[in-house]
Image (cartoon, rainbow, N blue to C red):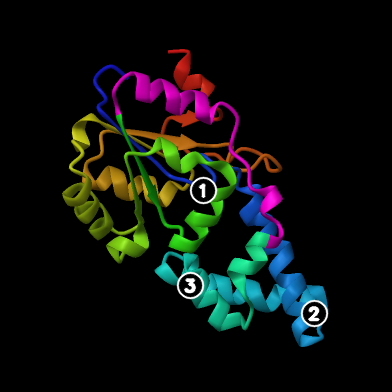
């Protein structure tokens, strides 16, 4: 950690409990869609999962305005309905405070839409800890694309050889590695309600306390 000057952090699953998003897209939206179209919950899930799948690794995947239009549902309002499920992973605030005390720059790099970021910041107050927040919707590319990283470095002026990037998505970490980010960690415990994810390609942390014990 001594040679690291910049901390680059993903939001959903890394800093925030992914259970909210899993429940929202897997349970709450299908229930509302089923109600709207007078179909069964199972049928709604089948239809929606096919729609979700067709937009993976694109900006549409995280564009809640797109999904509002696509599904004829007010997605931001539906998120607000269950915002009590939005939560920060254990020891995240302790880690962020420590990094600030050590004088490191802290940047949030997220694929989340601006409106989703706003809802989660309002609920958790985590936005106060970042020197800057960069959404893929500002850049025009998701983090899975190299173009995101070129534009992120130009905008944020981080030193990729002295930066630590933490994410819970293996494909994103692979792209960051290809771009030349030297220090990479896989956040295995993305959801409090699911088993940790596995990777054979990156060092793993389950809890931010692990980084504070070194």
The answer to whether residue 82 is magenta is yes
Q: Give residue 144's position: percent from left, percent from top.
A: 36, 57
Label drawn at residue 55? 3
**Can residue 167 be seen in the rendering of this structure?**
no
Residue at mark 2: 35
Residue span colored magenta: 81-104
Q: Residues within 10 Å of mark 1 (few under 14, many from 20)?
A: some
Residue at mark 1: 121
Q: Label 1 vs label 2: CA separation?
A: 30 Å
Q: Secondary structure at mark 1?
A: helix
Residue ID at (50%, 37%): 187
Q: Secondary structure at mark 2?
A: helix
Q: Secondary structure at mark 3?
A: loop
Q: Residues within 10 Å of mark 3 (few under 14, many from 20)?
A: few
Query: Going by the image, does 80 lie left or right of 104?
Result: right
Query: Going by the image, does 65 lie left or right of 166?
Result: right
User: Which sits in the foreground, 51 or 123?
Assistant: 123
Q: Could you tell me which quadrant the N terminus lies in?
A: top left
- Please tell me which of labels 3 and 1 falls first in the chain: 3
Query: Going by the image, does 63 lie left or right of 146?
Result: right
Rendered position, 23 above or below 105: below
Q: Give residue 202's position: percent from left, percent from top.
A: 41, 35
Q: Are marks 3 and 1 in contact (CB under 8 Å)?
A: no
Label drawn at residue 156? none
- Please tell me which of labels 1 and 2 falls first in the chain: 2
């Amino acid at each position: 950690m001594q040679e690291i000057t910049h901390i680059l952090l993903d939001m959903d699953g890394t800093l925030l409990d992914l259970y909210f998003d899993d429940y929202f897209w897997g349970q709450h939206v299908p229930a509302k869609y089923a109600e709207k179209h007078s179909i069964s919950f199972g049928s709604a899930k089948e239809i929606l999962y096919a729609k979700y799948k067709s937009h993976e690794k694109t900006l549409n995947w995280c564009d809640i305005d797109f999904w509002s239009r696509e599904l004829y549902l007010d997605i931001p309002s539906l998120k607000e309905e269950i915002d009590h499920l939005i939560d920060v992973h254990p020891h995240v605030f302790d880690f962020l405070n420590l990094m600030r005390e050590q004088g490191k720059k802290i940047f949030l790099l997220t694929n989340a839409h601006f409106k989703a970021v706003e809802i989660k910041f309002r609920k958790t107050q985590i936005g106060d800890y970042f020197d800057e927040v960069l959404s893929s919707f500002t850049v025009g590319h998701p983090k899975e694309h190299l173009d995101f990283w070129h534009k992120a470095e130009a905008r944020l002026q981080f030193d990729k050889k002295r930066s630590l990037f933490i994410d819970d998505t293996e494909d994103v970490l692979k792209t960051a590695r290809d771009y030349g980010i030297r220090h990479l960690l896989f956040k295995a415990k993305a959801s409090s309600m699911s088993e940790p994810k596995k990777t054979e390609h990156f060092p793993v942390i389950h809890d931010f306390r692990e980084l504070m014990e070194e």
